[in-house]
Image: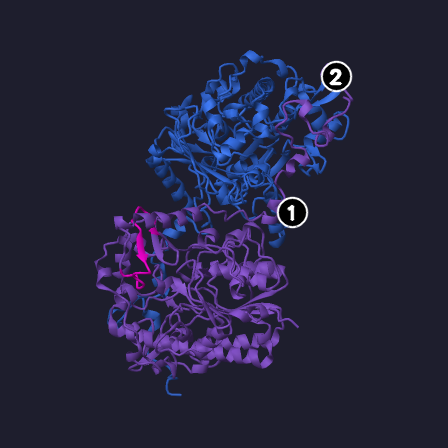
Chain colours: A blue, B purple
Amino acid sequence: MARAVKNILFVMYDQLRWDYLSCAGHPHLHTPNFDRVAAMGVRFDRAYVQSTICGSSRMSYYTGRYAQSHGAEWNGFPLRVGEKTLGDHLRAVGMDCYLIGKTHMRADEEGMQRLGVDPDSIIGVRASECGFDPWVRDDGMVPEGPDGSYDGRVSPYNEWLKEKGYPGPNPWSHYANSGIKDGQIAPAWILENADLQANIREEDSETPWLTDRALEFMDQQPGPWCAHLSYIKPHWPYIAPAPYHDMFGANQVPAPTRDARELDNDHPVYSRFARSPIGKSFQDDEARAKVIQAYMGLIKQCDDQLGRVLDRLEQTGAIEHTMVVLTSDHGDYLGDHWMGEKMFMHEQSVRVPMIVYDPREAADATRGTVSEALVEAIDLAPTFVEAAGGAPEFHWLEGRSLAPLLHGAAPSSWRDAVISEYNYAATPLAGVLGLSDEDARIFMVFDGRWKLIHFEGGIRPMLFDLQSDPDEFEDLGARADHAAEIERMYGHLNAWGRRQSQQVTVSKEKLDGMRGSSARRGILLGVARAADADPELFSKYVGPAQADYTKE
Amino acid sequence: MARAVKNILFVMYDQLRWDYLSCAGHPHLHTPNFDRVAAMGVRFDRAYVQSTICGSSRMSYYTGRYAQSHGAEWNGFPLRVGEKTLGDHLRAVGMDCYLIGKTHMRADEEGMQRLGVDPDSIIGVRASECGFDPWVRDDGMVPEGPDGSYDGRVSPYNEWLKEKGYPGPNPWSHYANSGIKDGQIAPAWILENADLQANIREEDSETPWLTDRALEFMDQQPGPWCAHLSYIKPHWPYIAPAPYHDMFGANQVPAPTRDARELDNDHPVYSRFARSPIGKSFQDDEARAKVIQAYMGLIKQCDDQLGRVLDRLEQTGAIEHTMVVLTSDHGDYLGDHWMGEKMFMHEQSVRVPMIVYDPREAADATRGTVSEALVEAIDLAPTFVEAAGGAPEFHWLEGRSLAPLLHGAAPSSWRDAVISEYNYAATPLAGVLGLSDEDARIFMVFDGRWKLIHFEGGIRPMLFDLQSDPDEFEDLGARADHAAEIERMYGHLNAWGRRQSQQVTVSKEKLDGMRGSSARRGILLGVARAADADPELFSKYVGPAQADYTKE
């Protein structure tokens, strides 16, 4: 019997760089379970996210649409009610869609109220949870400051820690994400604490906890389902439980990818990013090394937990009908380009791991291969719809199904460039630069060689040639001798800006059937003379006058 | 007591050209009631619609958003549920919003079902009626052909005609929109029938019927309200009841604005429009003259009916607190540029009348004046919200309030260019040209002098210089000596394409308050060393370690 996709395990790690996996060439970090999936499927080596910040990137994954199209351009910006989600698309073709972990979704409460959607109804819960049925939702982010809690929601993980006996009101903060130094809580928010052992039992830390929830789900739910297993790690606060906290030494930390030419670059936005407090904190080489040791430890833990999931899939035989996808919502600069965090457009930030195992025979030809096709995060939604046996609704979905690439059938055409966006209107940097909200926006266009970074606000673009300068050190954006490349890349961006992203109520198929149909429903234009009238089209309009009101 | 805007009478005529009014300089058509409003208010002489087809243009008026933003790019394309409407904006500031006549709205039934919106609930009715409370809805379009009726809805006007004794199943067609020739029904769809007398009593024809509904509304509804009084006429089928059918003679029909150079233009889209059946039917000069005589008669009837409304407003004193707005959803070529209908981007199609009477004292300074500001249809929605005493929500609304222009206070900046769009994917012409749906789209950018018309599908742009060539005869789009102007105009279009149209869940005010706020809610980035930590921000993260799990 032919193998079909019954279930889809859509695994996301938060802030996982594309190159911190052994299958992607990391020199010191061995990730046998990521590699195991890569050997079973296709590793897409040039996969790009639609935004370099969690919430916005995720809304693109979960809607299959660009950030400019779905409009939730920053963390905490609600996804407008009615925006169609992966869950909506999959349920329509008979596949449930569950959440296990993080989405960074915020509900459009005003919109739901306006449309009378009860937040406690099934429709309301799905609208609030970005189209997922929440098996467990935990965004893995429970910080607190003088103005209160960042995320008002109750964290199931934090509550679970309390039940396990971890003391205090916020064990997520004081145990899972802190160490101990001199008898005091040493929060991992401070980078120099990243080499401490997290003050938590390893099996109680975030990644195993969520893995347990996923195993419970898989044991209980036969499917067909798509399960979004969405880990917070290796996202900051950077700190790992034993034994992962000291598994890697300073000699295994890669040297930063940075160059003095970059600090000489007077580009107003880049130069301020590189000189921001975040940038400077990652220029502290000792602190950076501690962070990366923790980051590698956290990834190693993710890999071990992935092994548990894969083992279960193999033990139950579910691997025969389960598509497995491993990816991330964006990368992490980790001191490269003199920066920390993500939120800009170098490869370290915008490029992500994307590994897809497709159980179908059609994919046998590509197992263990690496694809160089330009892939976007928004490609997963149509890929999943296709795998579920449906026809992707391309009047909503702006990506492309990866099925042809997975099945070794080169598509007749593929995209020429990928687009990513970052809106920094809600950051202090917008104020430093004196920019309006509209002007605090960045667009990236990358065609596989040339990367153009456009800035609103009349700020000049940046340009990199990744063929001659794969490390992206030399900004050619001010160079007159590259004007032609800049113009060509702008051509991609401009065409993209004119795309139809909101014609979401008329399918392509329906539209194709409309051409000229109004004439057969009585809209008769272009007939000057009765002699030219088509008798069939005019049949309803002719006949003897039954009453004459022209004489009254 | 200061005069305030209590009610807004938002009058739309369908397919009314900007220049078929005596206040706009028409040489033969005297429209004293349009002129009366112009004398009381401001006539915006350079007002442009966002699309040159009814449904799409209207959705822009009713949402305050560009066609690319609301996505309903053609007639019969449903407006997506959740798209915020003029009615939503006005009701939020205490003003009801009623419909009397046409909208061309089609409900997003699939979206409503997905969100559980009952079509018969108040929310559902408003979602189905483009945000209006329907006092009476009649799209004025009840054609029928071999495949059935164009508009499946019951027409209240058609039903009213039947009650009045007009015989047959479709008196809209056989009486209101037909004449009699040789004892046979002579449908006005055939242009050479346009000079016939419509087979209906004048007082039973469409424009007086809808005016009666409006007078009933005004008598019964004290307000505050915005009432959209939306006439189908002078839209085709072109035929007028007595005495309007022969009020104008062939010698009062303006000569067509057309030039042989235009037929020599090999532009693939324009040349096919000019050679389409519609274009050819309006190149029949005798048929054209008959059409224009009827068109002028229909406008004259509209003017007389407008007089009834204005008289009632004056008799009741309501004119002291009623804003009156007269406009149209697009123009009509009427044989100019060798074309009929609308659906292209010459002034005859994309430019509309826009006359605004504002009762407030602040507007006294501008009464009877003409504004040359570049105005867009989407400006009315924020104008109405401001007049109703509210603050326009510019995260939804893409236009600008006209209040500064109405009140004689020159705004510090105004727009540099207007944008209009036309999507012809659903027309036979897209097939003739072999274009995909995405490529059958036109964008216009006009800066007050230069008009660029961009075509998707790799088709070259058209360019007109309205200063040296006000009639738009000479297409400069292929001329190398105008490359700089073309590039500059594309700059406007490209910036527009990158605009934020979908960030509709976060107000500008809320966004302004977000800059840097996450640090005070515990997101602490950029701290390498404990010594650099701000004690207040870190207050929740420090203290003695209560339990030590690192030893287990």
Q: Residues within 10 Å of mark 2 (few under 14, many from 20)?
A: few
* Residue B13 on the magenta segment: no
**Highlighted magenta segment, given as a residue range:** B454-473
Q: Quadrant of residue B127?
A: bottom right
Q: Which residue is mark 2?
A: A182
Establish if A423 lies above or below B92: above
Name the residue nearer the viewer: B180 or B521. Answer: B521
In the visual, does A372 lie left or right of A212?
left
Confirm whether residue B11 shows in the render. Answer: no
Which label was assigned to residue B402? none
Q: Which residue is mark 1?
A: A119
Establish if B548 lies above or below A357: above
Establish if A551 lies above or below A414: below
Kind of residue at disc 1 = Pro
Q: Residue drawn 25% across and 68% down?
A: B283
Distance from disc 2 to disc 1, alpha carbons, whole Å, reads 47 Å
Q: Where residue B491 appears, x then y in whole percent? A: 39, 47
Name the residue nearer the viewer: A441 or A8. Answer: A441
Which numbered mark, 2 or 1, is in the foreground of this view? 2
